[in-house]
Image: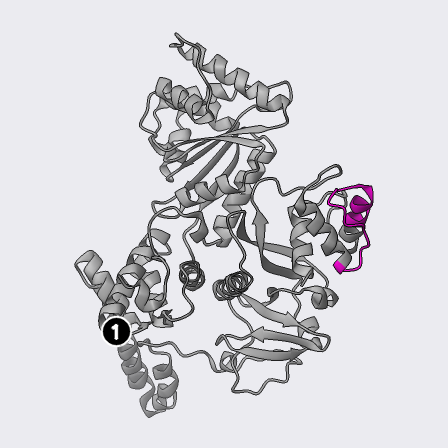
């Protein structure tokens, strides 16, 4: 209803598990990396847990997109099944044709074992993913444990990913499932979004939905969204969807804290009174504290009243004087200018926004790739080699991580996006002096097999060879990944501190992508 008003091509806050909308918070990124590690290293059992609405199913869909063509998958969503129904579902998902008259567990397990041995002999892998695994019965979980016995002398033939709510951990600790629990080699518990990540999450979803900054959630709105949702993505989606509807009805583009309060009231049937009560109690305590101090100290207490009142809670929070005009050494900034750094959530939001904007301009097709955040440790003098928007980590201020978002670079410095979203120019020394080591950018990861090695022939190899030539590594662009190409890749890997193997894997290709115009 509100899409055309805000300029969206689709609803940004739908609850469907669309991998395009997965916001790669540190927790979600780690969960994906845990699953990919467990699958690629053939660890057998992997368990991922998380609360209701934290994005487990979307994570599951994203995982499927990231597995190569040499990985066969079976996805089970219905966890209220018997052990026999499980075996039938697994074989059906893998596309295994059962012989006529097959009825017993042994028939299905034998057919599955033949299938797994066949794909293993061809260098492929098999993954079984079970969502909502906390609902599985003990009998079914024991049957799953028995499937892990399908193995060779050195490798597991099937990798099993159990995804469920936190109570799954309790289920697995039951004495009857001790043998299964001891076989789980990879575990990860998915965390809700932090307060600082929510702004980036909201912006990411609006950008994916085709937004161009027309809709804007104020800082007050983000605070109330966090208070209502606790960082739970499903709750964030619900309240943001309702808030945009309220804003549309009012004919305004800025979503304020008041609109969020109205949206929460419509969703829950009650206003968020608890927060107001807490604020009122805090004001009362401060007032009592002032009275006590003034009474105890007489008129001398008035010397401190301004400081006390300035710290009293209210509807807005003012930054400390020392942080209001934060500057970066060597940047030549005026005191009234905004800081050049952004927090983790805002920096991610800016990076993804610039990535999608560039992709739209160039007509990039995401049917064959998906955007991901990649991070490297690079020396600061390499900044001039980075041709696409990136962020660098900066020395932290207390417990808060800080990042400088760089739009483009030049011989004398760079263009950065400051805390207000404005472009600013800084000199080379400002980059070198504030370089924290870690550099991150958004990279369109190719779906399927993203690794090239000697003998590979594909259009992607030709693009790789042209990229190498473009940055000074000379190879003949033949479209075949030959020995000279492998040798130049090894030089590139050595120059930039990558693992030297002569194979153009995802990290090598991601760095090449960043260094080519």
Q: Label 1 crowding class (10 Å Cα cut-off): few <14, some 14-19, many 20+?
A: few
Q: Position of residue 188 (x, y in %)?
A: 49, 41
Residue plotted at (26% across, 68% down) = 248
Q: Position of residue 445 (x, y in %)?
A: 58, 49
Residue plotted at (31% across, 72% down) = 256
- The answer to whether residue 160 is above or below residue 482 is above
Residue 488 belongs to the span the image colors magenta: yes
- The answer to whether residue 265 is above or below residue 504 is below
Quadrant occupied by the C terminus: bottom right
Q: Position of residue 381 (x, y in %)?
A: 74, 67
Q: Image quarter for residue 133?
A: top left
Q: Position of residue 496 (x, y in %)?
A: 75, 56
Lateral position of residue 413 relative to residue 172, left or right: right
Lateral position of residue 269 relative to residue 129, left or right: left
Residue 501 belongs to the span the image colors magenta: no
Residue 312 in sight from this viewpoint: yes
Lateral position of residue 54 relative to residue 449, left or right: left
Quadrant occupied by the N terminus: bottom left
Q: Image quarter for residue 355?
A: bottom right
Question: Relative to the observer, which residue lies in front, 219 or 295?
Answer: 219
Write down the region rendered in magenta. 470-490
The residue at which mark 1 appears reads as: 251
- The answer to whether residue 131 is above or below residue 350 is above
Question: Relative to the observer, which residue lies in front, 21 or 57?
Answer: 21
Instruction: Work out which residue is located at the far top of the displayed protein and give it.
Output: 101
Residue plotted at (66% across, 49% down) = 507
């Amino acid at each position: 209803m509100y899409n055309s008003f805000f300029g969206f091509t689709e609803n940004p806050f739908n609850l469907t598990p669309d991998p395009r909308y997965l916001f790669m918070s540190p927790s979600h990124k780690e969960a994906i990396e845990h699953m990919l590690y467990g699958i690629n290293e053939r660890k057998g059992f992997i368990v991922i847990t998380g609360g209701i609405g934290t994005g487990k199913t979307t994570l599951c869909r994203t995982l499927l997109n990231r597995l190569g063509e040499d990985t066969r998958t079976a996805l089970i969503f219905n966890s209220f099944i018997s052990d026999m129904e499980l075996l039938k579902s697994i074989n059906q998902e893998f596309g295994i044709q059962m012989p006529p008259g097959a009825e017993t567990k042994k028939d299905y397990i034998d057919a599955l074992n033949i299938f797994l041995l066949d794909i293993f002999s061809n260098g492929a892998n098999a993954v079984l993913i079970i969502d909502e695994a906390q609902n599985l019965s003990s009998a079914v979980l024991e049957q799953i444990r028995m499937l892990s016995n399908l193995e060779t002398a050195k490798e597991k033939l099937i990798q099993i990913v159990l995804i469920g709510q936190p109570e799954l951990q309790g289920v697995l600790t039951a004495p009857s499932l001790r043998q299964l629990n001891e076989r789980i080699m990879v575990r990860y518990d998915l965390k809700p979004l932090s307060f600082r990540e929510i702004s980036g999450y909201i912006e990411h979803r609006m950008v994916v939905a085709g937004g161009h900054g027309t809709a804007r959630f104020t800082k007050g709105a983000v605070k109330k969204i966090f208070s209502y949702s606790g960082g739970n993505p499903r709750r964030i989606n619900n309240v943001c969807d309702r808030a945009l509807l309220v804003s549309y009805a009012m004919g305004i583009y800025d979503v304020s804290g008041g609109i969020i309060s109205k949206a929460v009231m419509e969703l829950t049937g009650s206003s968020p009174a608890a927060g107001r009560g807490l604020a009122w109690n805090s004001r009362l305590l401060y007032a009592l504290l002032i009275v006590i101090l003034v009474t105890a100290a007489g008129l001398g207490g008035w010397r401190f009243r301004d400081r006390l009142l300035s710290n009293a809670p209210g509807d807005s929070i003012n930054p400390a004087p020392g942080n209001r005009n934060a500057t970066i050494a060597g940047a030549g900034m005026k005191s009234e200018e905004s800081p050049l750094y952004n927090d983790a959530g805002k920096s991610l939001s800016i990076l993804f926004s610039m990535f999608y904007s560039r992709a739209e301009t160039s007509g990039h097709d995401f049917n064959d790739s998906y955007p991901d955040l990649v991070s490297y440790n690079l020396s600061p003098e390499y900044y001039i080699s980075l041709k696409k928007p990136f962020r660098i980590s900066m020395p932290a201020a207390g417990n808060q991580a800080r990042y400088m978002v760089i739009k483009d670079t030049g011989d004398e410095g760079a263009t950065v996006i400051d805390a207000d979203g404005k472009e600013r120019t800084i000199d080379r020394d400002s980059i070198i002096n504030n370089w924290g080591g870690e550099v991150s950018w958004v990279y369109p990861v190719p779906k399927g097999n993203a690794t090239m090695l000697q003998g590979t022939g594909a259009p992607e190899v030709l693009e790789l060879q042209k990229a190498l030539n473009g940055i000074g590594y000379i190879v003949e662009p033949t479209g075949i990944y030959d020995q000279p190409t492998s040798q130049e890749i090894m030089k590139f890997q050595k120059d930039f501190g990558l693992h030297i193997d002569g194979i153009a894997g995802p990290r090598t290709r991601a760095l090449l992508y960043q260094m080519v115009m």
